[in-house]
Image: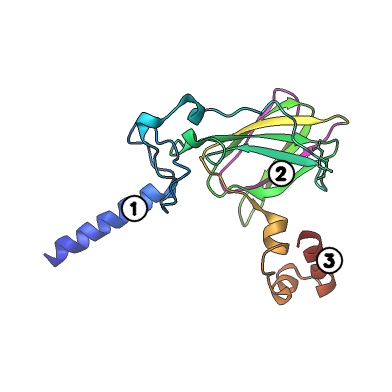
Amino acid sequence: MAHHLLLISLLAFTCFSISSAFEPSPLQDFCVADITNAALVNGRVCKDPKLVQASDFFFTGLHLPGNTSNSFGSKVTPVNVAQLPGLNTLDISMVRIDYAPWGVNAPHTHPRASEILTVLEGTLYVGFVTSNPENRLIAKTLQKGDVFVFPVGLIHFQRNAGYGNAVAIAALSSQNPGVVSVGNAVFGSNPPIASEVLTKSFQVGKNVVDRLQAQFL
Ligand SMILES: *[C@@H]1O[C@H](CO)[C@@H](O)[C@H](O)[C@H]1NC(C)=O
């Protein structure tokens, strides 16, 4: 009996671990997010399928350039489950990224998604870094029509390497990929990470840490 219980809990644990590693496969045609339901589940609660409309599967506006008048000179316009409720449970979403000349989409990672990016206009220098201990930079200059993939979890970036504006569209393998920007996470957290942690971690003086924190806070 005790053996059975142990086996069952082990099985349950294994199944849970597997199913929670990635978004679960749909068990029905769709599960449009019910944005009025505040229940805390993994993802969003389904809207009654009988009440679902075409508008639940629709987003408009991705033809519009994002406003790149900021210190990075880039703007990401997301279309994930927050903008398009029909994406709930479907493991997919997209973004439009606009880049002013020399604009950068600063190093960041998506904890829940791989990303496949295609250049619609301009020239982008893009890359990602492999995990420790190699930390190999895999980078390339892309032209209009070129496609590049950023594997899930790895830190990546893009920079407009041309004289005109650049535009990219990217698809991501999650309804809610999440973004961790390296600078914001390390130097702009709220509350700030103690400077003793950062000075020792980066082997720099407190003045350098203060300077970087001032940039991101
Ligand atoms: C773009 O953003 C800047 C800075 O926030 C703002 O001053 C400007 O009005 C915006 N431009 C447009 C067209 O919205």
Position of the C terminus, as image quadrant, is bottom right
Looking at the rendered structure, which numbered label has been put on residue 157?
2
Q: Residue at x 31, y 57 (%)?
A: 13
Question: Residue beneath label 3, please?
Answer: 211
Q: How is the image coloured?
A: rainbow
Local crowd size for mark 3, using a 10 Å CA cut-off: few (<14), some (14–19), many (≥20): few
Give whichever of 28, 119 is nearer the camera: 28
Q: Secondary structure at mark 3?
A: helix
Q: CA distance from mark 2 to mark 3?
A: 22 Å
Q: Is the shortest distance between ligand 1 and the CB of mark 2 under 8 Å?
A: no
Q: Amino acid at mark 2?
A: Phe
User: Which mark is first along the chain, 3 or 1?
Assistant: 1
Q: Amino acid at mark 3?
A: Arg
Above or below for 214 versus 21:
below
Question: Residue beneath label 1, please?
Answer: 16
Q: Residue at x 67, y 59 (%)?
A: 185
Q: Residue at x 81, y 74 (%)?
A: 206
Above or below for 157 versus 64:
below
- Are the residues at dot 2 and dot 3 in contact (C-beta closer than 8 Å)? no
* Residue 121 picture quarter: top right
Q: CA distance from mark 1 to mark 2?
A: 33 Å
Q: CA distance from mark 1 to mark 3?
A: 44 Å
Q: Secondary structure at mark 1?
A: helix
**In the rendering, at what x and y percent does residue 128 appear?**
67, 44
